[in-house]
Amino acid sequence: MMRKKLIIVAALILSLTTVSAYAGMNMDMSGMNMKSGKMIMLPMTAANGVSAMAHLMDIKASMRKMDMAATNHFMIMFTDKASKKPLTGGIAALKITRPDGHTDKPLRMMAMKNAFGVNIVLTDKGTYEFTVGTRLTDGQKRTFKFKYTLK
């Protein structure tokens, strides 16, 4: 049973990486809050020469089948603004501030091909703030913020 769960989670991560890589191909999503099926693109942001594109993917149904609580997968891609090349190395962590104002402990994000991601639980209606702290391969610390309203 555990092996089956691991295979399903690995397949989910692979599919999310593919979707994310496709979404990042020379598209400027800045200023958009586009809802495309079960994937929600968050407005792009930038810090110290690096742009960040993030999205949420609804994974409730898949996780429920495995008796897991996660409702969404948060994924973020970083791009060097000068070279337009993806930044894939380093570390990233996500802090979630919930609609009631409570901020969760940071979640270490898993490095994937061209992105970082983590499964999260969003259940309360209202506005969530996502704060991603990074130390990419250049060693510089950066912070990126995103907001999303769950209706």
Image: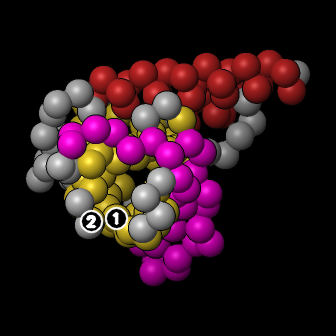
The residues colored magenta run 83-111
Image quarter hosting the C terminus: bottom left
Q: Does the magenta stretch include residue 38?
A: no
Q: Mark 2 points at which residue?
A: 47
Q: Does the magenta stretch include residue 94?
A: yes
Relative vertical location of residue 111 with respect to residue 138 in this rendering, above or below: above
* Residue at figure coordinates x 60%, y 45% from the top left: 110
* Residue at figure coordinates x 56%, y 42% from the top left: 111
- The x, y position of residue 130, in whole percent, is 41, 64
* Residue at figure coordinates x 59%, y 68% from the top left: 106
Cα separation between marks 2 and 1? 7 Å
Q: Alpha-carbon neighbours of circle 2 within 10 Å: few (<14), some, or many (≥20)? A: few
| Lower position in the chain sequence, tag 2 or tag 1 | 2
Q: Name the residue under label 1.
A: 144
Q: To which quarter of the image does residue 56 belong?
A: top left
Q: What element carries label 1?
A: strand
Q: Which of marks 2 and 1 is in front?
A: 2
Q: Alpha-carbon neighbours of circle 1 within 10 Å: few (<14), some, or many (≥20)? A: many
Nearest the viewer among 48 and 31 is: 48
Residue occupying the far right of the picture: 1
Can residue 123 be seen by looking at this rendering? no
Proximity of marks 2 and 1: CB atoms separated by less than 8 Å: yes
Image quarter hosting the N terminus: top right
- The x, y position of residue 70, in whole percent, is 61, 45
Identity of the amino acid at label 2?
A: Ala
Identity of the amino acid at label 1?
A: Phe
